[in-house]
Amino acid sequence: MGMPDAIGHLDRVSFEDTMVPDLGTMLWFEADFSVEADSGSYAFFVQRIYTQQASPEGAEGYFPVPTNTAAQIILELELRSYLETNQGVRELLCELADGAGLEHWLHVAA
């Protein structure tokens, strides 16, 4: 197995009404992923997770998950684990990567 090669990124991928089993709740969130080529297959790594919340200035929207409390750290870790291990998420990311033209780079890196 060769070393993975960075071939691109997927920014602000939206997940709406998504059940995260380890959290036992439906969530709306977004995530940025780096995309690497690993022996002809995609490998996806979460770079940042955004949840629906109010900013410190009071604006509503999607902002990076803060990690100031144990509950926030657990949320971030559970979402990261879900995104990097769920087969349905992987299939979606593969479709998005192909649609973004990364399939060419996947084959070049192989």
Image (cartoon, helix red, strand yellow):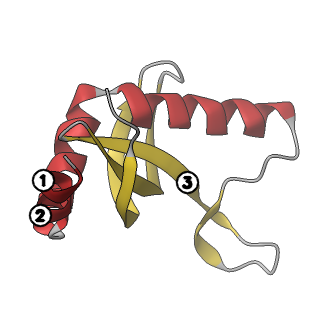
The picture quadrant where one finds residue 34 is bottom left
> What's under tag 3, amino acid-wise?
Gln
Alpha-carbon distance for marks 1 and 2?
5 Å
Q: Is residue 16 above or below residue 84?
A: below
Mark closest to the chain's N terminus, 2 or 3: 3
Residue 78 horizontal/vertical position (percent): 57, 29
Q: Is residue 65 left or right of residue 85?
A: right
Q: Write down the residue under mark 3.
A: 47
Answer whether labels 3 and 1 touch (C-beta < 8 Å): no
Of badges 3 and 1, nearer the viewer stands 1
Residue 49: image location, x then y, percent: 56, 53
Per the image, the residue denoted by label 1 is 107
| Residue at position x 46%, y 53% in the image | 29
Residue depicted at 45% across the width and 43% down the height: 27
Q: Which image quarter: residue 87?
A: top left
Q: Please state which amino acid type lies under the numbered disc 1.
A: His
Mark 2 lies on a secondary structure that is helix
Position of the N terminus, as image quadrant, is top left
Residue ranking furthest to the right: 68
Q: Residues within 10 Å of mark 2 (few under 14, many from 20)?
A: few
The residue to which callout 2 is attached is 104
Verify CB contact (< 8 Å) between mark 1 and mark 2: yes
Q: Amino acid at mark 2?
A: His
